[in-house]
Amino acid sequence: MNGMLQLNSLYNMDCMQGMAIFPDKYFDIAVVDPPYGIGNDGGKIGGDNGTPATNYTKYEWDSEPPPPAYFEELFRVSKHQVIFGANHFIDRIGKPSPCWIVWDKVNTGKFADCELAYTSYKTAVRMFSYRWNGFLQGNMKNKEARFHPTQKPTALYAWIYKNYAKQGDKVLDTHAGSAASLVAAYDAGLDYIGFEICEEYYTAATERIESAKAQLRLDGFMQAEFTSGGGLVIIMFELNGLYNIDCMDGMKEYPDKYFDLAVIDPPYGIGEDKRAHQKSGTKPGKSKVARNVYSLKDWDSEPPPPAYFKELFRISKHQVIFGANHFISRIPLDSPSWIVWDKMNGATDYADAELAWTSHKSAVRIFQYKWNGFLQGDMKNKEYRIHPTQKPSALYIWIYQNYAKEGDKIIDTHAGSASSFIAAHRCGLDYIGFERDEEFYTLAMQRVEAERAQLTLFDISAPVINGGGVMILILIPYLISKATR
């Protein structure tokens, strides 16, 4: 499907145009607060509880609720819906529901005691109590600045996601307004898309999201995610980040089977860190190719210990492990499914191919891509080599296309040059990477930032979908991502 939208972004556009881009049931849950048709679209609001009234810019967006065509499209693109204000336009929804949400606003004064939200779920009516009465809010220590006349608290959306969403869900808000729904989705580790047609609100909302993201970074990248069992897991490392730490310290922060796929290229124990610092050299009679100069290190004297593989298998459901032929005795499982990377090296002193063990049950697969010094498989888009055992991004893209699916989370414990990170970014997969060496980490981050800058200028991401095809999503948006991507 060709489209124009990237996940974890807010777009200043009409939601009908935006929804038209997505396939049926793409979103797991739509949480929307559309116009109710009651004229609450700005002007002087409040002032009856002893606090000053707030003046909002007067617009004309609340004269009518959305037309039936809106609800048809909303139900087409989402599996489940939570629709605030539906009591004002239930005839346009046309579907009964036993499960409504009652938000008790703990109000005094002329405003409604509560608001109602229709849901598509089959459970009983649920109530959430949270004060939202002019100056008074349920959390006075962390008050939310209000810039939209019908703004709702992030606590309300957080409660909705906790009770009606699960890890891996994609959220849609067609009328983002103050972006409270998006901030809450970001906090919960959920992917989202938001639309806001009003430029003033869009600008304020994007600033709010960036501020929320910055605060989470200051808090040590603490991120809350829901497990499949409904519990709350605190993750120390935000998804789609590369971290300069020891992978053993990083992996212990994660619960069992948190990652769908680990794609790793650990030390093989063959001394590549000693040979790679030399400038050149080929055996007599062999083709001579240029060799980069790398710093002399001491990281390839031994492969990882058995404790490393035990931890890797604990936190990931599947694994692709390069160089496993050098340390197969440390991997506890046999596998019929190995990957052969034919490097098309020709008559050089380098290996003709590299092998990767996988936990999958398919047959041996081969991938051909030239990677011979100066020569690369894609000479028009050559990759600058910063690491002595660097692998091409094309190799990782092929792996993700054949062994991953939409929504998967990837881990690379020895990120090195960050080729695995760049490939995951291009494929629309969530990612965590660790690189202990500070020099390689710095160079890898420079490479990642260059990649992000290019994709921000003209972003083309290709998420792998369940059927094995590729969905192309393109836009030049104000990007709002769950990490620094």
Image (cartoon, rainbow, N blue to C red):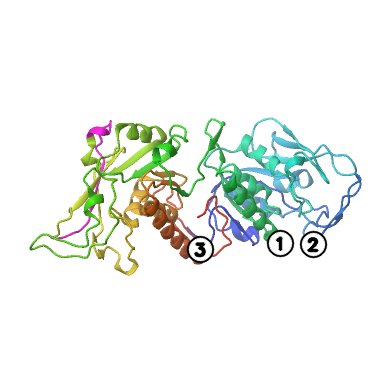
Which structural element holds mark 3? helix
Report which residue position mark 3 lands on.
456
Residue lying at the far bottom of the rendered structure: 380
Does residue 418 show up?
A: no
The three-letter amino acid code for the residue at tag 2 is Tyr
Q: Nearer the viewer, mark 1 or mark 3?
A: 3
| Image location of residue 299, percent across then percent down | 29, 45
**Rendered image: mark on residue 59:** 2
Answer with mark 1 or mark 2, whichever residue precedes in sequence. 2
| Image location of residue 385, percent across then percent down | 32, 60
The reply, left or right, for residue 439 in relation to residue 147 is left
> Decide: marks 1, 2 in contact (CB < 8 A)?
yes
Report which residue position mark 1 lands on.
198
| Image location of residue 3, percent across then percent down | 51, 60
The three-letter amino acid code for the residue at tag 3 is Thr
Highlighted magenta segment, given as a residue range? 329-347
Query: Quick one: 6 or 217, which is closer to the camera?
Result: 217
